[in-house]
Image (cartoon, rainbow, N blue to C red):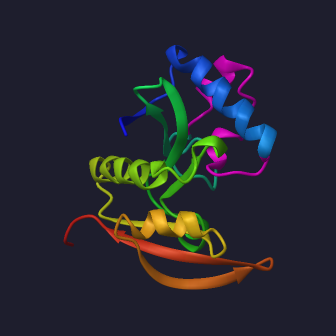
Amino acid sequence: MNIKLVKLTAEYKKQLTDMMDEWLAVEKDFSPYAIRKNDYHDFEYYLENLETKEGEKPGLVPDSVYFCLDIDRNIFVGAVNIRHYLNESLYKSGGHIGDGIRPSERRKGYATAMIGLALEKCKELGINKVLMTCDKTNIGSAKSITNNGGVLESEFEEDGVVEQRYWITLVSI
């Protein structure tokens, strides 16, 4: 597996379009929300509005969005959204990292590897303890979190869905 996290640029427009077309043909409500909140067909707008800057929108925290590039095949296999800190809402549900793997690339180990790379980005941002959440029924997501050192802290139910909260300690604090 030869992957890296990249920021979206015009160079990756085709990779983005291919991944999003596939994903949206299968499911409309996937994670990370950051990559589906705007219409990717308007690439310039999409690119300009992909990330939230500090103080840009009330109630939202700054974030960084990375796409997971399979270098050998030159395709995007997934994406991660890293929230730079937690507000009350993200502390309860959502956490620091939202991630997703496109449907055709699931169950191949990409999520575990991609989260590992995202944790390196968290370290660069000075985040020492990372919160990740997932639906209890999403066994693959839970496994990719625990494979990266995630420790289940709690579960809660919201709108009939049980959500799990995992903490990953990156450095001694």
Q: Is residue 61 visible?
A: yes
Determine the residue positioned at 50% across, 45% down: 63
Position of residue 148 measured from the top left corner of the image (x, y, whole percent): 36, 64
Q: Residue drawn 52% across and 27% down?
A: 75
Q: Left or right: 68 with respect to 3? A: right
Q: Is residue 38 visible?
A: no
Identify the magenta region.
Answer: 27-51
Q: Residue at x 19, y 71 (%)?
A: 172
Badge count:
0
Q: Which residue is at 53% across, 20% downward? A: 12
Q: Position of residue 93 (x, y in %)?
A: 60, 69
Of the 4 image quadrants, the one containing the C terminus is bottom left
Residue 124 percent coordinates (x, y): 28, 47
**Position of residue 168 in the picture relative to residue 23 (left or right):** left
Examine the structure image and report whether residue 28 is included in the region drawn in magenta. yes
Query: Magenta segment: does it hold 9?
Result: no
In the image, farthest residue toward the top? 11
Up the image or down, 134 lies above or below 15; here it is below
Image quadrant in which the N terminus is located: top left
User: In front: 45, or 61?
Assistant: 45
Residue 113, position as x, y percentages in the image: 39, 50
- Using the image, determine if residue 123 lies above or below residue 51: below
Magenta residues, dominant SS class: loop
